[in-house]
Image (cartoon, rainbow, N blue to C red):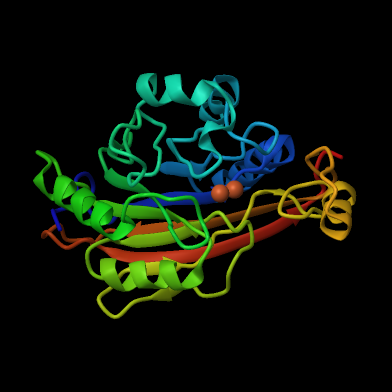
Amino acid sequence: MPADPGEPGHSVRLLFVGDVFGRPGREALSRGIARLVREAPLDGIFINGENLAGGRGLTASKVEECYRLGVTALTSGNHLFDQKDAEGLLVSDPRLLRPENFSAACPGTGHRIFTLASGYRVGLANLIGRTFMAPADCPFAAADRVLSDFEKAPAPPDFVAVDIHAEATGEKQALAFHLDGRADLLYGTHTHVQTNDLTQYPKGTWFLGDVGMTGPRWSIVGADPASALSKYRTMVPRPFRVAEGETLFCALLVTVVRPAQSGGTKGQVEVRLLREADGGGG
Ligand SMILES: [Fe+2]
Ligand SMILES: [Fe+2]
């Protein structure tokens, strides 16, 4: 890993947020960021935006709203193309990633190095699973390509984070072993439920099965419980509605404590799992 730029002894705070669901999710994100910034500044904020707009996909205006909150970049997943804005955004907005292992003909990219205001560089990659999911290219081979690209960059990243947007825990854990020692953080998204398995793997990679949704707490993975429950019970499709009321803010806060002596070491990585309920907008 390359030497850290900037001041020795400085800490870098990076926030990773899972699926942000609809307006309740965007409001919970705003409140969650405000609470954390009161403790100390956040150097980078990374969210999964596949459910930003009404729970289904994302639009230019909702992405812009996130940038105004301080979001650095967005990953995505299977709901990316639920709204028509996504195709154009992937071309025009370098801060929006799509899964790297979507078709090579898909617009946009699934990985990029983001240079933060301090000069610290975060290499962010977005992968999608194949177990119980729509067909996609191999996420393991895609991860290898991404890491090779990061290594060959003129200014390689100081920290490498990978969002694995996937259903199956086994597939996510397999990727953890595949990337152990090669990425700093592998975090799951998509299931909308936070897992209690934050683990540092033997060669140093931090892993979390799923960060969990930031969105309406009393919901069925974000949807209004009445309509979703009725659909499960009767098999009759019901109109989809985003649930309202109390919200959950789920995130992973990574602090890289850089050594007091600059000497090419990466610094100590501390990871804090957040799952905070608040009043919500109703
Ligand atoms: Fe999602
Ligand atoms: Fe998803």
282 vs 92, left or right, is right
Rendering coords of residue 276 (x, y %): 69, 58
109 vs 181, left or right, is right
Q: Residue at x 23, y 49 (%)?
A: 146
Q: Which residue is drawn at 43% across and 58% down?
A: 130
15 vs 276, left or right, is left
Rendering coords of residue 90 (x, y %): 40, 26
Rendering coords of residue 105 (x, y %): 30, 32
Quarter placement of the N terminus: bottom left
Rendering coords of residue 61 (x, y %): 59, 20
Q: Which residue is drawn at 40% across and 58% down?
A: 255
Q: Using the image, determine if residue 256 lies above or below residue 62.
A: below
242 vs 259, left or right, is right
Closer-to-camera residue (221/154): 221
Quarter placement of the C terminus: top right
* Furthest residue in direction front, as rendered: 235
